[in-house]
Image (cartoon, grey):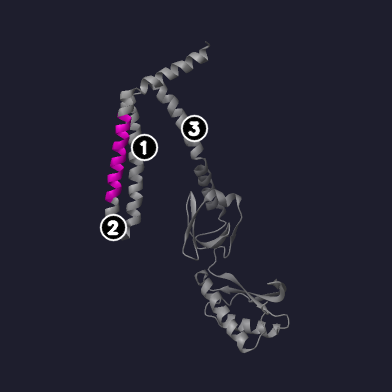
Amino acid sequence: MNSNGTDIVGDLLVILELFNLYALVLLVLGGFLLWGLNWAITRASNRLMERIPTRRFLVLQITTLISFFIYIAGGIALVLGVLQPPREFLLAAGGSAAVALGFALKDIAASLVAGLLLLFDRPFRVGDRVTFDEVYGEIISIGLRTVRLRTLDDNEVTIPNSRFITDVVASGNAGALDMMVVTDFHLALDADLELAKKLIREVIVTSRYAYLKKPVTFAIEEKALAERLAIRIRAKAYVLDVHHEKAFQTDIVTRVSQLFREHDIARPMRG
């Protein structure tokens, strides 16, 4: 048998000596002890969250950290105390664990580097309205590892920084307080377009949410709507504050629709 075969047999014998019946029983008992301790802490944290519900998220975070520490520290203590492995075995296991940890932390390291790039490049800022991978909302925090975005439905989305380096992100206001809001109106082919534009402009400039230091513009084109041709008037106006984006759009659509009815502006016929 060559030297490599001898080394493998020797390593197997060392492992078999470590994991004898007595050691295995102690490891199982120690595992149950760790599980019982974690179960007791979880029960206590649940009762604490019922008493102080306003702090339930903080309690849950602390409980998770304690559980993680118990399993990691307790597992290491069990292995070292019960098995008492030789120094060579510890070095080999430590090297393997370091390699596995490196692969596991690869994405986190990439996000940390990307976070530093975002701080210098600044493609968006806190408070910006951005669209990323079909998610639209306001940037509420930019950390070293993740960016947090709150959607208009009040959902908080956490995105790793590394995604922003390779994917496309669109910023609606790029650090400014005002932002363009685009609103579409569909009319029949024979509708009075000039009157429609006049009514839409009147509504926009009289809205309390409008930012009138920037122009109101229109884009008109024919579009297929439910297999029928229609005229689309796209109104482009600026809202005073990005927080009023949907309120501004709702105000425009509500009042314009009412004026269209009052002035008999023809809308697309239903099929």
* First to last magenta residue range: 26-44
Q: Position of residue 271 (x, y in %)?
A: 68, 77
Q: Is residue 144 left or right of residue 59?
A: right
Q: Which secondary structure lies at badge 3? A: helix
> What's the residue type where badge 3 is placed?
Val
- Of labels 3 and 1, earlier in sequence is 1
Q: Residue at x 49, y 40 (%)?
A: 105
The dot on residue 72 is 1
Q: Residue at x 34, y 25 (%)?
A: 83
Inter-mark Cα distance, 3 to 1: 18 Å
Viewer-nearest of labels 2 and 3?
2
Q: State the count of labels.
A: 3
Q: Dot 1, how many residues are within 10 Å of its Cα: few (below 14), some (14-19), or many (20+)?
A: few
Give the vertical position of 191 relative to 239 (above or below): below
Identify the residue position indicated by label 3 in the image. 99
> What's the residue type where badge 2 is placed?
Glu
Identify the residue position indicated by label 2 in the image. 50
